[in-house]
Amino acid sequence: MRRAALALVVVLIVAAGLAPARAQAPYYAGKTIEIVVPFGAGGGTDIEARFLAPFYEKHIAGNPRVVVINRPGGGSILGANFYTANAKPDGLQILATSGSTVIPFILGVPQVQYDFKKWKLVKVNGVGAVAYVSPGTGIRRPEDILKPAQPLVYGGIGAANLDLAMVLAFELLGMNVRSVFGFEGRGPARLAFERGETNIDYQTTPAYLSQVAPLVQERKAVPLFTFGFTNEKGLLVRDPAAPNLPTIYEFYQQVHKKKPDGQLRWKALQALLNPAFTFQKALWVPQGTPPEVLNALWDAVDKMNADPEFKEKSKNVLEGYTLFRGDKMEATVIKSLTVTLDVQKFIKDLLRTKYNVDI
Amino acid sequence: MAEALGAAAELFFVPARLGMMLLGVLAGLVVGILPGMGGIVAVAVLLPFVVRLDAIAALAMLTGALAVVHTSDTITSVLIGAPGSAASVPTVMEGHPMARQGQAARALAAAYLSSLIGGLIGAVGLTLSIPIARPLVLAFGSPELFMLTALGVSFAGSLLGKEPRRGIIAGLLGLLLGAVGPSPAAAQVRFSFGQIYLMDGLDLAIVALGVFGIAEIIGILARGGAISERVDLGHGWVQGIRDVIEHRWLVLRGSLIGMWAGVLPAIGATAGTWMAYGHVVATSKDRSRFGKGDIRGIIAPEAANNAVEAGDLVPTLLFSVPGSAPAAMIMGALLAYGIVPGPRIVQQHLDIIYVIVWTFAAANIIGATIMFLASPALARLAYIPFTRLAPAVILMMVLAAFQETQHYGDILTLLILGVSGYMLKATGWPRAPLLIGFVLANPLERYFWLTVNLYPDPDTWLLRPAVLVISALLVFPFVWTAIQALRRRGVREARAAAVRWRPGLGTMVSVGLLAIFAYATVTALGFLRGSSLMPLAVAILGTILCGAQVIQEIRGRSVPVAEEDEAPEGATGQIVARALRYLAGIAVYTVLIWFLGIRLASGLWVTAFMLVVARMRWPLAVLYTVVTLLGMELLARVLGIHLPPGRIALPGL
């Protein structure tokens, strides 16, 4: 028995020795930054984080090691909650978020314990999206969308997720669309469009350019509108990756011969556009992170943007959109996450009455 | 095409790039050996190193790793009975019993050779199909995908075991477990008990590790001794190769099934392996050896799971719709090098695609060769007293499970499923249908829902030619089984001497299952319309069948008999008692991790295990524990895992 006790003591000592020791060196030199991805490996946010990690290693002063940690669960709520509960303001743990993290926050989903206003923005970048129909719908001009030659069928993942922007666009434009939810992603939904099972769809602009533009050339798809892009002043402009296509704002005017401003439907869609598209992929650290740490992180963004290797390789991964420094965009991003109660109520009512989704 | 193949060869056969591929292959082999870890871990580990390489070298490394994961995962599955990855469970079911009979070498040789051939067939298939696959993939609409998953479920029908009712109940239980989490049909999370952890559903790797891995380990421990008591005479290797030659058509069929399952992104890699396994069992005349170590049950799935990875690259490259997470990560790497998968890739980057093909083929050859050379040494593991291996293996499985979401729920789920898996195993419930049900639950429900909603008029999909063909295939095994059953009537199979649990214990399991199904029925009644459909049907059917089972057991007409644990008569009471002690031990470990964190808990538990169970002398026990803990730390570093701390805060732990 004494031997057993002795054995345990030895083991305890060794176990204690294995615990990570704290390095005493200039900030970030010799340190490890963890990017916490609240999604599974292989998803869009994960792939972007893994792509950025080595460039952060190269460009953050002190060249820390940067590793990606996946903490999926609850459609990213679990990971973001974990981050809220555990991250210290030391710049060593950075949270990656996407539109799927923001939408439950905007809608006030009860499981959400995180608050973007309690974080500092490290970087943000986004992506546009393009909506298109099949030629079989007979839609040639914008106004045709109100009287298509065949019933419109849309394939989505779930009304309360990233499809929400599309659902709100249908609402705004006054289109009559039958939505079928249950696809496992936008890729399989696009396959259903190609097979002719659905006839209206949207894809992120890069996916549109590489996957759907060839179909447009073969006259198997007709583009309608983009969801636009928010510039640094917070204004909705044309998607830089698809400058020839009208934004949803312009498209509305072409259909209805008036501006959508002032309508609650437009406000609701507007509230969704930034989190779902322009500010889709963001990195955050807790508030209270020391300024020198924040500056090191922010400066890395500028250095990356100036790095020719990064420019070359990020063309397709970041999908042609700029990586913004967090300090420049923070106010705009935070503002876009604040939704007025009437908009929240409008969206919730719409989801409940038309899509049987109760939040 | 020939031109691109030649150009690709020039790009590929460069020493530096071949070297990178070799590194990838080695990484893939090591990750494959670790229980429960598959392609996703291999690719994730390599990705940071890949960024600095040129495009071809990077692809060679990643593809090399992905290609061989399913070659080396065999070794864990066969020798320890812990699935090397979720897709290698059929190999556990057939290969592990062979190891116990002293035929590990034969099983391994057959598995490697089938893997190798499967991989090569996959590479050839990829080469031939890339230029023409687009219309082929698009020909499979939602109805066809639904019917194919239904076909996969029906394959489970051939794996039902001696008592079909129990097999069906197990399959239903799998479907029910698969229904945990988000419903594909409506915005609703099901059976989550208010836990955010369950909101995304259960993880396949954890289910496979628990129901087969942990359960198997408890089984071996309870039986006592080493995995194999008999000494392999060394003819095994030759015999394994002969087996593959004899069953060459089976290798081809398995490879094609796997390839095709990979091409259709809805079905998934694991399902492909199971379909190949189900197919073998369904088409074999003599089924008596399946589940007890039938070499055919290794050959087909092993060929399939290497071919799946090649097939998976088709939708990834042509549609930029990856069928699996590792394929998605390879796609991300492709994007970084300016190669955009999609309809234009065939015109723009055919040479790159063929570099991938070359890598895939070469990696399969190299991987299988390395494993052939390494296995005689590794096969000795089977002769070590298992009590010395078990704690390290259990710890590794806990770590493998934990890296999925890094939440304590991973560990809890693993160990609960492990204990339940053992209870099922020990009372004679077949577990294969359970896993098939789990794997296919989601695509089955999803594509059924999509089909009926996208085709509101049933005639438009029910009469599609492919749907009719698959329907015929669906009915066939049932007719076949019925005919065989009629023929066999009267000839009762002699039951092997097996562990007999007292009827009371077996009935307790049946009653527990009844309670689960009944609870699920009541809960599912409250779900939204779309999302209640499948779980409700499954739960009601399960309740009825379980009810019948319990009644029969209480009347004493069916005595639960363990699945495959051959044990000398008379020793059974001991085994049961030992098993209960190990179950308790696992429970204690689970609780310890929660309170003390994994470092301290594992330190205590492993040391205690070595001292008390393995009866090691204490310096050796400490050394063992320290080495195991160091291994855990190293793995955690490499994989980016935060070892979970305990509720009781201890400085530094």
Image: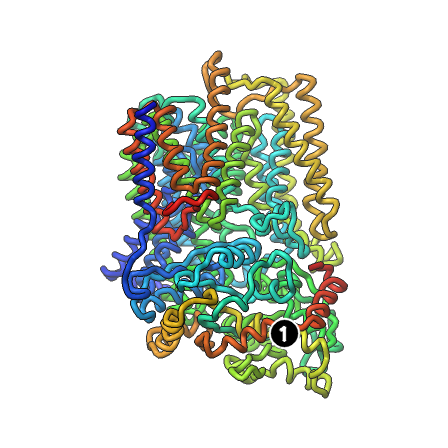
Is any part of residue B230 visible from this angle?
A: yes
The way the protein has been coloured in the rendering is: rainbow
Residue B314 in sight in this render: no
- Choose top left, top right, bottom left or bottom right for residue B449: bottom right
The relative height of residue B555 versus residue A61 in the rendered view (above or below) is above
Residue shown at the point (42%, 40%) measured from the top left = B397
Residue type at the position of mark 1: Ala
Residue B46 in the image, given as x and y percentages of width and height = 35, 56
Q: Which residue is nearer to you in this view: B516 or A149?
A: B516
Q: Nearer the viewer, residue B426 or B302?
A: B426
Write down the quadrant of residue A75 in the picture: bottom right
Q: Chain of mark 1?
A: A
Residue B438 screen position, x and y as percent: 57, 43
- For the N terminus of chain A, the image quarter is top left
**Considering the image in quadrants, where does the C terminus of chain A appear?**
bottom right
Seen at 57% across and 63% down, the residue is: A100
In the rendered image, the residue lying farthest to the bottom is: A257
- Give the crowd class for mark 1: few <14, some 14-19, many >=20 residues within 10 Å: many
Q: Is residue A27 left or right of residue B91?
A: left
Q: Secondary structure at mark 1?
A: helix
Direction left: furthest residue = B15
Q: How many marks?
A: 1
Which residue is the site of mark 1?
A271
